[in-house]
Amino acid sequence: MGVEKLRKVKLGNYPTPLEKMDNMTKLLGKGDLYIKRDDTTGPAFGGNKTRKLEYLIREAIDTGCTAVLTVGGTQTNHGRTTVGAAVKYGLKPILVLSGKDTGYLSGNLNLDAMMGADIYFVSDPSKQKEVIADVCKKYEEQGDKVYVIPGGGSNPVGAVGYIMSVKEILDQMKEQDIKIDHLICTVGSMGTFGGMILGAKYFNAPFDVIAVPVSPAPKGDKEKRVADFVNKVSETYDMGITITPEEVKIAYGPDDAPYSGERYNKPDPITREAIITLAMNEGIFLDPTYTGKTFRAFLDLVKEGDLVKEGETALFLHTGGAMALWTKEHLDDMQDQLRANCKTTQL
Ligand SMILES: Cc1ncc(COP(=O)(O)O)c(C=O)c1O
């Protein structure tokens, strides 16, 4: 069946805004800078997972499932959105999270708990597969049928959400009479980036799609994995598109201070500086694990002229996740930078 005809449930509010960042455009003085607000999709504070979950939850319902299980780190945004989507459609939400239960629920965990998720913490990541099988068995013995969603919702079904988001952007470009030359997004589990690459080719978008990794990766490896993913999705839906690793554009940043930071979810002051810049100029909040890193790259690539040439337009895809700003570890780590950024007066 053609990718455009695939059925989905309704979760998000679309189109998400595509807006010019007037102050950032003025501040950088290079081309026109836009933002696509996929952080506003909803439900459960939304983010990029909503578009994927619309197709995944449809499949869960169509296959008679009564529970949805997904995996991720303890602060997974994908997990939180999945719980919200499951709750909305009357499915039991189950999370299998790699990490320890610290005894304190903050950030996404706070919200997962509020929505009534069953949460399993797995201390040893090598045991995750085993745990998923055991947890599924437990629920199935109780009469549930469990739909398992892979990390980040990144399989061919989930990727359709981002293939189709390109069509939404093209419609908005037409309405606003603008041309986007470059789109920059984050790459983690690949569904967003892979879907956008495929959508850009499928719908003949005039922009290239560039991604920033969320953790350090050897150059070449990620490009190959993204190309394999894109080709698999294309084959699944008979889209007739194949790409090579050489066509996959990833921005790594300087060797001594890569955009990905030291590792996944490790707070770092350069990323926080980018987060503060967008907050101070546009009143928009990013997150320290994904979009902050990508926005730092966006600013760098625009300033250095590697991304935006004279008269060009660049679009930053905001994929959500700002709840991570309220996790205990990020709050603790941010205090000095926040104090230096504002004036506080005790009267
Ligand atoms: C806020 C946010 N942005 C970007 C990503 C990366 O998207 P993907 O996993 O589709 O590569 C994630 C993944 O969890 C995320 O939570």
Image (cartoon, rainbow, N blue to C red):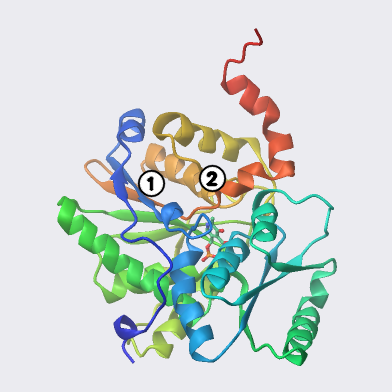
Instruction: Check disc 2 and report the residue beneath it.
Output: 292
The mark closer to the camera, 2 or 1, is: 2
| Looking at the image, residue 197 lies above or below residue 40 | below
Asked if disc 2 and disc 1 are in contact, CB closer than 8 Å, the reply is no
Tell me what residue is drawn at x 64 percent, y 22 percent: 339
Q: Position of residue 286 (x, y in %)?
A: 51, 44
In the rendered image, which quarter contains the N terminus?
A: bottom left
Tell me what residue is drawn at x 84 percent, y 53 percent: 102
The secondary structure type at the circle numbered 2 is helix
| Looking at the image, residue 274 lies above or below residue 149 | above
Instruction: Check disc 1 and report the residue beneath it.
Output: 306
Crowd rating for badge 2 (residues with CA inside 10 Å; few <14, some 14–19, many 20+) = many
Kind of residue sitting beneath label 1:
Asp
Q: Position of residue 122 (x, y in %)?
A: 81, 69
**Can the viewer see residue 28 in this picture?**
yes
Distance from the alpha carbon under mark 2 to that under mark 1: 19 Å
Q: Using residue 71 as the reference point, say whether residue 89 is left or right of it.
A: left
Quarter of the view holding residue 23: top left
Kind of residue sitting beneath label 2:
Gly
Q: Nearer the viewer, residue 6 or 336?
A: 6
In the rendered image, which quarter contains the C terminus?
A: top right
Quarter of the view holding residue 317: bottom left
Tell me what residue is drawn at x 69 percent, y 56 percent: 109
The secondary structure type at the circle numbered 1 is loop
Tell me what residue is drawn at x 69 percent, y 45 percent: 327
Quarter of the view holding residue 66: bottom right
Q: Nearer the viewer, residue 244 or 174?
A: 174
Which quadrant of the figure shows ligand 1? Answer: bottom right
Q: Nearer the viewer, residue 61 or 21?
A: 61
